[in-house]
Image (cartoon, grey):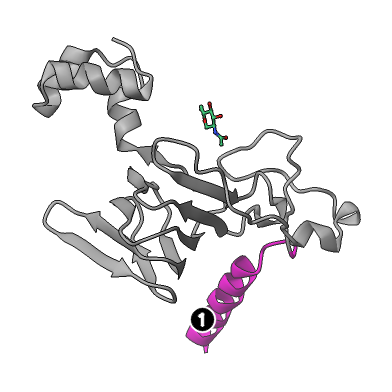
Amino acid sequence: MKIIHILFLFTFISFTICHASVNDFCVADLKAPNTNSGYPCKPVAKVTSDDFVFHGLVAGSTNNSFKLGVTPASVTNFPALNGLGISAMRVDIEEGGFAPMHTHPGATELIISIQGEVTVGFVTPTGVYSKVLKSGDLFVVPPGLLHYVINSGKGKAMGYVAFSSEKPSVQILDLLLFGNKLPSNLVAKTTYLDLAQVKKLKAKFGGSG
Ligand SMILES: *[C@@H]1O[C@H](CO)[C@@H](O)[C@H](O)[C@H]1NC(C)=O
């Protein structure tokens, strides 16, 4: 009898903990500072249906050296995503363009190919996982892995991306190596790249040193 009581108590406590959330949602109050546990909530009395819709997942400008346009719908422009661990992005890539090697620490990325043909891939210390995607294909990139997308077809490519984070961070390999003030000789030494090549890439990506 006692054990049954204890079991009941445990079940009751874990049930209570799992349903401890006091709010059905927490639309971000973007005027307050962001924290590791997200933005504070906008008062429920001020939340309206408009908070749960995002307009304008339209093509971003592709006028850059990657010929890549990205339009994110993350917590900073779609505040209802606050705390929900999900967001979206539209990606447009002109013929010959690409998304350079990058990672999203902590976020899984689901690529939904709509138009054109892209080659996507990610790498691990032991493997290369790459596929050509056509309209209607999906490809998943596990969290934190270095990956790329190349428009490998004719004409424009377009797709949508879902992330398992309301504000995925992006770390672009070229910018980490060549877009800051890490000394060129240090970068050359630690990557085996020629110093002249490092300096050339520093100039391209806005780094110094
Ligand atoms: C593309 O960008 C360059 C420089 O960043 C600018 O001079 C040019 O006018 C832009 N072209 C278009 C079509 O926006």
Residue 167 in sight from this viewpoint: no
Camera-side residue: 53 or 92?
92
Picture quadrant of residue 5? bottom right
Residue 90 in sight from this viewpoint: yes
Q: Secondary structure at mark 1?
A: helix
Give the image location of residue 28, x and y in percent. 72, 47
Q: Quadrant of ligand 1?
A: top right
Give the image location of residue 87, x and y in percent. 57, 57
Q: Name the residue rendered at 21%, 63% in the picture.
A: 129
Q: Name the residue rendered at 48%, 61% in the picture.
A: 158
Say left or right for 110 vs 151. Answer: right
Say left or right for 187 vs 161. Answer: left
Q: Residue under label 1, please give it.
A: 7
Give the image location of residue 196, x and y in percent. 15, 16
Camera-side residue: 84 or 60?
60
Magenta residues? 1-24
User: In the image, is residue 16 above or below residue 176?
Assistant: below
Q: Does the magenta-highlighted stretch encompass residue 13?
A: yes
Q: Quadrant of the C terminus?
A: top left
Camera-side residue: 2 or 198?
198
- Most common SS among magenta residues: helix
User: In the image, is residue 37 above or below residue 25?
Assistant: above
Say left or right for 123 vs 11. Answer: left
Picture quadrant of residue 11? bottom right
